[in-house]
Image (cartoon, coloured by chain):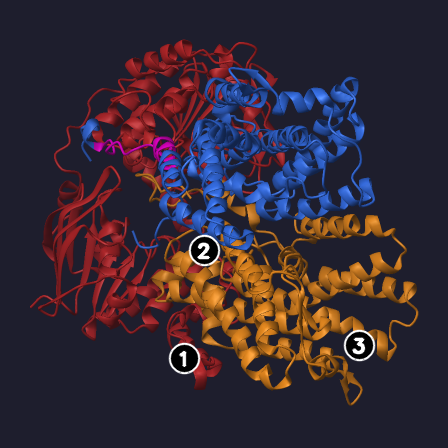
């Protein structure tokens, strides 16, 4: 085995998933515009971006968890977002001065749920899918116990104006908040020790352990962050809807995974980033708008979403063959 | 006429060319040795024949007619059966179930015929009953058996397939003498009935005792085939190793008299009461047959194994052995034995692979990284260790094995370790890279680090180490300190024990 | 799931290579399963004095069957080294197809049941192909297919409705020689498993789940075996759907959702390792009964209705956590 010439070994640069996802979003917009003129108008696009923001923020945590590897995934994000919105709505109850306590309590509860997920996964070695799926039942139970089946309260006006009001350039404040979070998360992933440890743990846990990385702590924190971002998205969603329902954000579970996958975050762990996920969230939102424009039923959209995820996974997430 | 002809076999795994124009020609009714140093492609060639590896290019002829082997079933159809180096038994199935696996006798509707299965298993296993202390545990889960017994089950599984070509890849590695004896009897009977046995072993005495012909591989190419009746061991070794200049440079000890590292009574599941000390600047070698606790010792010293008893002191102060995190922080570094699985992050950039163990030292508040500082640190190591890379942002998997290993070592150099543990650091890397790794180890020792170095290559072990500890079954059984110690002494020390006790 | 990089072909030292591989090498022992069963039965009897009355037994067993059937199906997939998170959705789809085709007429039943079974087979085949041919991780692949199946169920039956013939539901609540029909169904499922266990395919399922590479090298048709496991699981999902229909008498396009996780929990409680290759369906049947009895307890212990779901959710999580508690684990002989 002579030292090979390195440059010849480098795989040919393919289009990065981020670029592909962006292309896909634009393509969908064009299709929409053709099918239904006005689909890609300015107002429509701003609205689609705003809807994307909720998904995009929930998917932050999902991206982090998937990067952490070990079949990492967080199915409880939708329920956690719902629960956070329910707590927030009840505590703030339309009062701006109670916004901060409401936010604090909601995010603390979310963090506690994430901690349970992380502990169960690392110390009790429950597979993430199973653990977080089980957590859905627990959180649903908590919601019922907390609300007695009836949601209370409403969003604080400030929260509503942040999400819905036009702040600068005729754009809602939510979009600026999303941008801020996107920058912060990207910085965390790329320019902090935690971010690099997270990628290392996702890429190879044994190597990570033998490189002196606190693997369990890294993984647990990933699940805590996932729940916290889900909780934050739930609160923002509350600002959008102003009042809360018992299944407010439940349907974000599958799209949050799909957004990460579209954006090039590998389910195997160790590879990915937030820019792709954010674009993935836009792609999915545009796709939903298009399906609604085409008058496809909710059931049909569910089927299509499942199929889209399967197709995307086949493109990116294949396992190795037994025969080499 | 040759029963088996393999020509122009070529196989690339990622960046490594495992086979490059390998060939093998052997007749029925002979035992044909397939020899070569570690990483020369023996196992890959065997697996090509058995359909587990699909070659990039190959022409295989059996009985004069060309055959295409796309999978194990094709190989089976052509009468090929194999005993793999990494066993292909299923731990949770019983001995009988494993022997008939894939070819279970069935009755109507595909229901299993247990009695027939037992008969098939008994036919091959009774021969080996001495190996199971008299009675064959037909219904025991294979996972509960000793490594030697599992190996016998693997062999019996191959025999039950009634092969015309039987591949034995390191089939004797975990067997003790009596078991080897029975196996050889069986192999000779098979040979006499016209079967071709392809035999791979690192034990030269076995090769000479059993085989008729030998084909030698080196760096994925066939060097030649030789009749063993008129060959000497030296000839074979020369074919395998090629013309290597023996380094004349004697070992120079830079060890000071100051003992810095003391291991006292270290005991884990796989280690028993290991004690030794290392002086500042000393390179302590770990020798003996591989798998006798060398890797376990290094892992334990790095806090990666559960310690039952014992301690490790540095300058009289106990080192934390409870987790690698603490060990790393205390200045211990481990270059693990399996680079791909334990040492590197294949899909991550070289930059991150280099920074990962030491970045907190350069980060603001141990959190915020400066890209410039990380790059500078990484570049420094790349230059210092002469790592050949395209760019720091490339994945480490794009590098050759030797350069990957240098990255793994470099990762630790950035952490300025006081204790460096190396587990077979030159395994599977080319000669040039090996020399560079040797230089790094010397430099580390010269700069005052205590170095503990395990190697499966006795020659390099002797050249690099100031002292060598010989391990057997998790304990230190010999210490070779004499500067005049030779490779023969080391081998004798390791093997004497093997002959004395059985595994 | 990383591709093995060059230079890793040599066997790794056993200690650490298996360190993280042990991640899912967890298994509750058979004794623990039986002990749990005894405890939950005792608590049930204490809370529900007429527990052993004919009526109570019949209605209890009637609610066990769907869970028992799906747990057996899940066991088979788990043994093969996979997992099927779409089983609940398959139950839903099979049940709505069956109820729509039956349309309350006894005469339509044979055709409807055949179609319902066909749905299970088709779903299993689809899962198997996605996992094996497209080589996706089973856990995500079946999660994605679950959306396809439950979406299709909503297309077939957009809202709860449809009726099963009364003969079908009353027969299910009947008893033969004093033995409830539902109990007979459970015994039939167990017998089906015992027969299956003696089949070559099941042996191969164990081998593939235990060590796919070894099985492949030993001439086991790995791909076909994996697909078969999903198909068999799909058939059990159909059986589960029939039991639900017999029990409730009507169709519901959301009925199966909760079953998926419970089936995984039943498998774990029953002592089948989630990593595959070890365990069996008898344990899962007991596990399913344990879980059903636990929700009985929650019901009869006067837990306020708003807390019932929380209690059930916690029980499932605790059951899953059991597998992680070392004292209850059956360790590999070291």
Distance in Å between CA atoms under marks 3 and 2:
52 Å
Magenta span: A9-24
**In magenta segment, residue A22:** yes
Position of B483 compared to A305: left or right? Answer: left
Q: Secondary structure at mark 1?
A: loop
Q: Which shade of the palette goes to chain C? A: orange
Q: Quadrant of the N terminus of chain B?
A: bottom left
Q: Secondary structure at mark 3?
A: helix
Q: Which shade of the palette goes to chain A? A: blue
Chain assignment, label 2: B
Q: Which picture quadrant has residue B491? A: top left
Tell me if mark 3 has few (under 14), some (14-19) or many (20+) residues whose alpha carbon lies within 10 angstroms of its own.
many
Q: Is residue B457 above or below residue B483?
A: below
Are labels 1 and 3 assigned to the same chain?
no
Position of A73 compared to B432: left or right? Answer: right
Sequence-wise, which precedes: disc 2 or disc 1? 1
Which of the pair C8/C276 is nearer the observer? C276
Q: Label 3: which residue?
A: C58
The structure residue drawn at horizontal position 36% and vertical position 15%, both measured from the top left corner, is B378
Spot occupied by residue C181 in the image (x, y as percentages of width and height): 73, 82
Residue B484 seen from this side:
no
Q: Label 1: which residue?
A: B105
Tell me if mark 2 has few (under 14), some (14-19) or many (20+) residues whose alpha carbon lies within 10 angstroms of its own.
some
Which of the pair B251/B106 is nearer the observer? B106
Spot occupied by residue C150 in the image (x, y as percentages of width and height): 56, 58
Q: Which picture quadrant has residue B98? A: bottom left
Q: Label 2: which residue?
A: B147
Chain assignment, label 1: B
Tell me if mark 1 has few (under 14), some (14-19) or many (20+) residues whose alpha carbon lies within 10 angstroms of its own.
some
- Note the chain letter of the red one: B
**In magenta segment, residue B352:** no
């Amino acid at each position: 085995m002579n030292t090979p010439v390195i440059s010849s070994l480098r795989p040919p640069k393919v289009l990065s998933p981020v670029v592909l996802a962006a292309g896909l979003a634009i393509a969908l917009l064009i299709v929409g515009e053709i099918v239904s003129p006005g689909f890609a108008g300015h107002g429509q696009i701003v609205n689609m971006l705003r809807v994307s923001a909720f998904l995009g923020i929930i998917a932050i945590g999902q991206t982090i968890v998937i990067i952490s590897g070990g079949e990492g995934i967080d199915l409880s994000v939708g329920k956690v977002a719902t629960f956070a919105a329910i707590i927030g709505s009840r505590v703030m109850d339309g009062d701006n001065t109670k916004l901060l306590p409401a936010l604090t309590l909601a995010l603390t509860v979310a963090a506690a749920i994430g901690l349970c997920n992380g502990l169960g996964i690392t110390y009790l070695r429950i597979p993430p899918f199973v653990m977080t799926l089980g957590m859905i039942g627990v959180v649903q139970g908590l919601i019922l116990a907390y609300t007695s089946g009836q949601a209370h309260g409403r969003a604080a006006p400030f929260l509503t104006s942040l999400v819905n009001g036009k702040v600068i350039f005729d754009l809602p404040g939510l979009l600026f908040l999303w941008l801020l979070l996107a920058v912060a998360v990207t910085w965390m992933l790329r320019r902090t020790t935690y971010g690099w440890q997270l990628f290392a743990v996702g890429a190879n846990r044994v190597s990570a352990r033998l490189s002196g990385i606190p693997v369990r702590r890294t993984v647990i924190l990933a699940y805590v962050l996932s729940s916290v971002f889900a909780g934050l998205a739930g609160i923002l969603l509350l600002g959008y809807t102003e009042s809360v329902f018992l299944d407010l954000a439940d349907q974000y579970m599958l799209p949050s995974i799909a957004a990460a996958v579209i954006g090039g975050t590998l389910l195997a762990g160790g590879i990915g980033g937030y820019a792709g996920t954010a674009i993935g969230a836009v792609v999915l939102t545009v796709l939903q708008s298009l399906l609604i424009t085409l008058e496809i039923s909710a059931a049909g959209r569910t089927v299509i979403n499942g199929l889209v995820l399967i197709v995307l996974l086949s493109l990116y997430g294949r396992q190795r063959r037994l025969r080499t | 006429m040759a029963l088996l002809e393999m020509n122009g076999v070529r196989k690339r795994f990622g960046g490594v060319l495992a086979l490059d124009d390998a060939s093998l020609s052997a007749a029925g009714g002979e035992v044909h040795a397939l020899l070569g140093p570690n990483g020369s492609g023996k196992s890959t060639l065997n697996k090509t024949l058995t359909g587990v590896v699909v070659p990039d290019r190959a022409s295989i002829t059996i009985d004069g007619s060309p055959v295409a082997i796309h999978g194990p079933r094709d190989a089976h159809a052509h009468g090929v059966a194999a005993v793999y180096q990494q066993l292909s038994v299923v731990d949770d199935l019983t001995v009988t179930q494993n022997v008939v696996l894939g070819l279970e006798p069935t009755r109507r509707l595909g229901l299993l015929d247990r009695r027939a299965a037992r008969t098939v298993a008994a036919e091959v296993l009774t021969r080996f009953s001495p190996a199971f202390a008299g009675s064959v545990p037909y219904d025991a889960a294979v996972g509960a058996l000793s490594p030697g017994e599992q190996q016998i089950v693997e062999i019996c599984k191959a025999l039950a397939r009634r092969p015309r070509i039987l591949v034995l890849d390191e089939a004797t590695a975990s067997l003790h003498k009596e078991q080897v004896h029975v196996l050889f009897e069986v192999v000779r009977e098979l040979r006499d009935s016209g079967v071709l046995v392809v035999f791979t072993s690192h034990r030269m005495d076995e090769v000479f005792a059993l085989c008729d012909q030998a084909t030698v591989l080196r760096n994925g190419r066939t060097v030649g085939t030789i009749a063993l009746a008129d060959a000497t061991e030296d000839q074979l070794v020369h074919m395998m190793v090629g013309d290597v200049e023996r380094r004349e440079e004697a070992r120079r000890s830079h060890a000071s008299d100051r003992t810095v590292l003391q291991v006292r009574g270290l005991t884990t599941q796989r280690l028993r009461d290991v004690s030794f000390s290392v002086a500042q600047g000393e390179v302590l070698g770990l020798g003996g047959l591989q798998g006798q606790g060398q890797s376990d010792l290094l892992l334990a010293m790095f806090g990666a194994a559960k310690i039952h008893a014992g301690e490790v002191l540095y300058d009289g102060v106990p080192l934390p052995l409870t987790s690698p995190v603490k060990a790393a922080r205390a200045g211990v570094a481990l270059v693990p034995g399996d680079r791909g699985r334990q040492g590197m992050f294949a899909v991550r950039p070289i930059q991150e692979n280099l920074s990962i163990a030491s970045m907190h030292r350069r980060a603001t508040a141990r959190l915020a990284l400066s890209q410039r500082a990380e790059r500078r640190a990484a570049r420094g190591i790349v230059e210092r260790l002469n790592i050949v890379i395209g760019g720091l942002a490339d994945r480490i998997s794009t590098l050759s094995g030797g350069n990957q290993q240098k990255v793994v070592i470099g990762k630790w150099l950035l952490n300025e370790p006081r204790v460096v543990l190396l587990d077979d650091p030159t395994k599977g890397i080319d000669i040039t890279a090996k020399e560079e790794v040797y230089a790094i180890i010397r430099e580390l020792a010269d700069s005052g680090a205590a170095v503990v170095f395990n190697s499966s290559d006795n020659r390099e072990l002797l050249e690099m180490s100031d002292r060598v500890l010989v391990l057997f079954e998790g304990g230190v059984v010999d210490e070779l300190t004499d500067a005049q110690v030779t490779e023969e002494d080391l081998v004798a020390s390791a093997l004497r024990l093997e002959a004395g006790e059985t595994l | 799931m990383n591709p093995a990089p060059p230079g890793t072909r040599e066997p790794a030292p056993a200690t650490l290579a298996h360190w993280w591989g042990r991640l899912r090498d967890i298994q509750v022992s058979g004794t623990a399963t039986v002990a749990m069963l005894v405890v939950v039965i005792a608590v049930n009897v204490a809370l529900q004095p007429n527990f052993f009355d004919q009526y109570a037994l019949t209605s209890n067993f009637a609610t066990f069957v769907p869970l028992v059937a799906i747990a057996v199906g899940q066991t088979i997939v788990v043994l093969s080294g996979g997992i099927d998170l779409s089983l609940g959705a398959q139950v839903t789809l099979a049940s709505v197809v069956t109820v729509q085709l039956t349309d309350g007429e006894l005469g339509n039943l044979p055709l409807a049941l055949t179609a319902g079974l066909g749905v299970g087979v088709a779903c299993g085949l689809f899962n198997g192909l996605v996992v094996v041919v497209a080589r996706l991780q089973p856990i995500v692949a079946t999660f994605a297919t679950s959306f396809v199946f439950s979406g299709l169920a909503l297309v077939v039956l957009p809202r709860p409705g449809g009726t099963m013939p009364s003969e079908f539901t009353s027969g299910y609540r009947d008893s033969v020689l004093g033995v409830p029909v539902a109990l007979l169904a459970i015994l039939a499922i167990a017998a089906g498993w015992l027969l299956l266990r003696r089949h070559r395919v099941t042996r191969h399922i164990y081998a593939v789940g235990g060590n796919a590479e070894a099985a492949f090298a030993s001439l086991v048709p790995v791909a076909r075996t994996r697909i078969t496991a999903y198909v068999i699981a799909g058939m059990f999902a159909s059986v589960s759907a029939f039991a639900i229909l017999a029990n409730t008498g009507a169709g519901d396009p959301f009925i199966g959702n909760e079953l998926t996780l419970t089936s995984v929990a039943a498998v774990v409680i029953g002592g089948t390792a989630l990593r595959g290759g070890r365990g069996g369906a008898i344990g899962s049947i007991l596990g399913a009964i344990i879980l059903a009895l636990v929700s009985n307890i929650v019901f009869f212990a006067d837990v306020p209705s708003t807390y019932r779901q929380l209690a059930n959710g916690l029980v499932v999580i605790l059951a899953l956590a059991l597998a992680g508690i070392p004292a209850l684990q059956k360790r590999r002989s070291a």
